[in-house]
Image: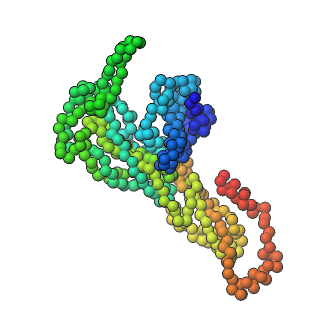
C-alpha cells in the first residue's frame, strides 16, 4: 500500500500551498543525493517527496487526491507509478529554489510538442557546483561561470526523418483478444526529434552539435543554503533540430566563516572580553556580513549575556526580511596572575561587592537558550 502523500511531507491535510512547498523544500534538502551519496534509502525518500509534491503542489491534482486517494492516478501519470526520472525531479527541485533563475525559456516540459504535432526533444541538463562565502549567502550575489555545453554547429542541415515522417513517434498496431490496439513509441532513428541530419561540418558530432565554452551569469538570491539546487533555463546542452535546450543545474556549497556561525536566518558570534572590560564596560568591534560594527558593553555585563542585533543576520530566501545577529558574551578569566594582581583578588574575596547577586532579570542558561531559539 502506497504511503500517504501528506505523511511523506509531514504536513496536515489542511496545510496551505506555502506550507506544502516549504515542507517539500526541507525534505528535498535532507534527502538530496549529493548530501547522501550511496544511500539508497535517502534516494528513495528523495523520490517519494518529489512524487508527493508533484500531486499536492498542484491544486487540481490535490483535489482529486483528497477525494479519491491514490486511485485517482492509477493507470498512468506521475502520481500512479512514480514514472518521473531523476532529471525531472532535479528540474522540479530547481524550480522550487530558483524559479527566478531560468528566465522564460527553458522548461516548457520534457517531451513537449511544437506546431503540427511534432515532438520537441529537450537537450540534456548540465550540473555544476558554486561555492559561496557567508557574505554572498547573506546578501545575494551574481556569479559568472564558464560552462562547456553542446550547441548546434554552424552549417548543419536537417531533413525529415524517413522513419517517423517528422512526427518523432512511430505507432504500432497489434491484434489482441480485446481488439486492435495502437501504441506509440519514440522514434529510434531520430530520437524523437522528427528530423535527421542531412549535412554537418567536420567539427560536429553525430547529432550536429559541437562543444563550446560559454560564460553564464547566475543570479543567486540571499538566503540560499548548502545543498540547494538552482536552475538556469536553456543553458544546458542544445537538442538537435528544433529541440529545446536543457538546463544548467547549480548546486550550492557554502564556505565556513571564521567568526560567524549560521543557524537558519540567524547568525551567532562569540565575543570574548576581559574581566576588567566586563566590570567597567566599554565598546568592542565585531564582524557582521555587511562589515565590522562597534557595539556598546554596559558596565557589569555578565558572561553568557546574549546581545541581539536585529536584522544583521541572513536575508530570508522567501522574502520575509532578515534574521538577527546574536552576540554571545564570554568573560575571559586569566589563568595566570602576577603577585600584585593575585593580592588584589585575594582582598576582593571578602568584599561584599564581588559576591554573586543575580537579579531576576538575569536569566538562567536554559532561559537564554529558549530565548535564542524563539
Q: Is residue 169 found left or right of 87 in the rendered image?
A: left
Q: Residue at x 79, y 83 (%)?
A: 347
Q: Position of residue 35 (x, y in %)?
A: 50, 50
* Residue 203 versus residue 199 in the image, above or below: below
* Residue 201 versus residue 63 in the image, above or below: below
Q: Residue at x 29, y 31 (%)?
A: 188
Q: State the residue lying farthest toward the bottom.
A: 339
Q: Is residue 326 found left or right of 341 in the rendered image?
A: left
Q: State the residue lying farthest toward the front.
A: 177
Q: Nearer the viewer, residue 206 or 19?
A: 206
* Residue 61 versus residue 18 in the image, above or below: above
Query: How is the model colour-coded?
Result: rainbow
The answer to whether residue 240 is seen in the rendering is yes
To which quarter of the image does residue 142 belong? bottom left
Q: Position of residue 131 (x, y in %)?
A: 44, 56
* Residue 29 versus residue 181 in the image, above or below: below
Q: Nearer the viewer, residue 172 or 264?
A: 172
The answer to whether residue 136 is seen in the rendering is no
Q: Position of residue 159 (x, y in %)?
A: 20, 32
The N terminus lies in which quarter of the figure?
Answer: top right
To which quarter of the image does residue 27 belong? top right
Q: Residue at x 67, y 78 (%)?
A: 335
Q: Position of residue 274 (x, y in %)?
A: 65, 75
Q: Residue at x 37, y 43 (%)?
A: 125
Q: Nearer the viewer, residue 179 or 29?
A: 179
How many marks can you see? 0
Amino acid at each position: 500500500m502506497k504511503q500517504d502523500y501528506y505523511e511523506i511531507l509531514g504536513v496536515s491535510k489542511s496545510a496551505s500551498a506555502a506550507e506544502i512547498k516549504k515542507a517539500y523544500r526541507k525534505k528535498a534538502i535532507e534527502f538530496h543525493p549529493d548530501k547522501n551519496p550511496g544511500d539508497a534509502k535517502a534516494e528513495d525518500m528523495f523520490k517519494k517527496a518529489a512524487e508527493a509534491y508533484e500531486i499536492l503542489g498542484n491544486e487540481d491534482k490535490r483535489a482529486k487526491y483528497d477525494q479519491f486517494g491514490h486511485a485517482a492516478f492509477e493507470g498512468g501519470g506521475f502520481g500512479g507509478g512514480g514514472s518521473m526520472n531523476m532529471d525531472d525531479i532535479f528540474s522540479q527541485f530547481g524550480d522550487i529554489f530558483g524559479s527566478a533563475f531560468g528566465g522564460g525559456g527553458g522548461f516548457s516540459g520534457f517531451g513537449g510538442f511544437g506546431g503540427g504535432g511534432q515532438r520537441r526533444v529537450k537537450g540534456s541538463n548540465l550540473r555544476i557546483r558554486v561555492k559561496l562565502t557567508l557574505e554572498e549567502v547573506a546578501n545575494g550575489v551574481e556569479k559568472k561561470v564558464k560552462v562547456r555545453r553542446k550547441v548546434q554547429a554552424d552549417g548543419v542541415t536537417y531533413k525529415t526523418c524517413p522513419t517517423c515522417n517528422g512526427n518523432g513517434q512511430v505507432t504500432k498496431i497489434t491484434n489482441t483478444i480485446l481488439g486492435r490496439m495502437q501504441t506509440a513509441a519514440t522514434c529510434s532513428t531520430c530520437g524523437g526529434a522528427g528530423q535527421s541530419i542531412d549535412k554537418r561540418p567536420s567539427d560536429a558530432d553525430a547529432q550536429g552539435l559541437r562543444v563550446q565554452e560559454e560564460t553564464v551569469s547566475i543570479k543567486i538570491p540571499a538566503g540560499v543554503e548548502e545543498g540547494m539546487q538552482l536552475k538556469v533555463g536553456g543553458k544546458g546542452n542544445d537538442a538537435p533540430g528544433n529541440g529545446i535546450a536543457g538546463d544548467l543545474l547549480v548546486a550550492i556549497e557554502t564556505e565556513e566563516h571564521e567568526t560567524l556561525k549560521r543557524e537558519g536566518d540567524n547568525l551567532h558570534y562569540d565575543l570574548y572580553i576581559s574581566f576588567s572590560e566586563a566590570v567597567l564596560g566599554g565598546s568592542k568591534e565585531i564582524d557582521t556580513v555587511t562589515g565590522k560594527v562597534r557595539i556598546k558593553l554596559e558596565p557589569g555585563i555578565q558572561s553568557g549575556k546574549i546581545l541581539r542585533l536585529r536584522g544583521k543576520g541572513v536575508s530570508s530566501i522567501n522574502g520575509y526580511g532578515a534574521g538577527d545577529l546574536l552576540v554571545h558574551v564570554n568573560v575571559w578569566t586569566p589563568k595566570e596572575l602576577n603577585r600584585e594582581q593575585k593580592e588584589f583578588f585575594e582582598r576582593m574575596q571578602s568584599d561584599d561587592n564581588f559576591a554573586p547577586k543575580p537579579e531576576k532579570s538575569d536569566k538562567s542558561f536554559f532561559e537564554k537558550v529558549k530565548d535564542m531559539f524563539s
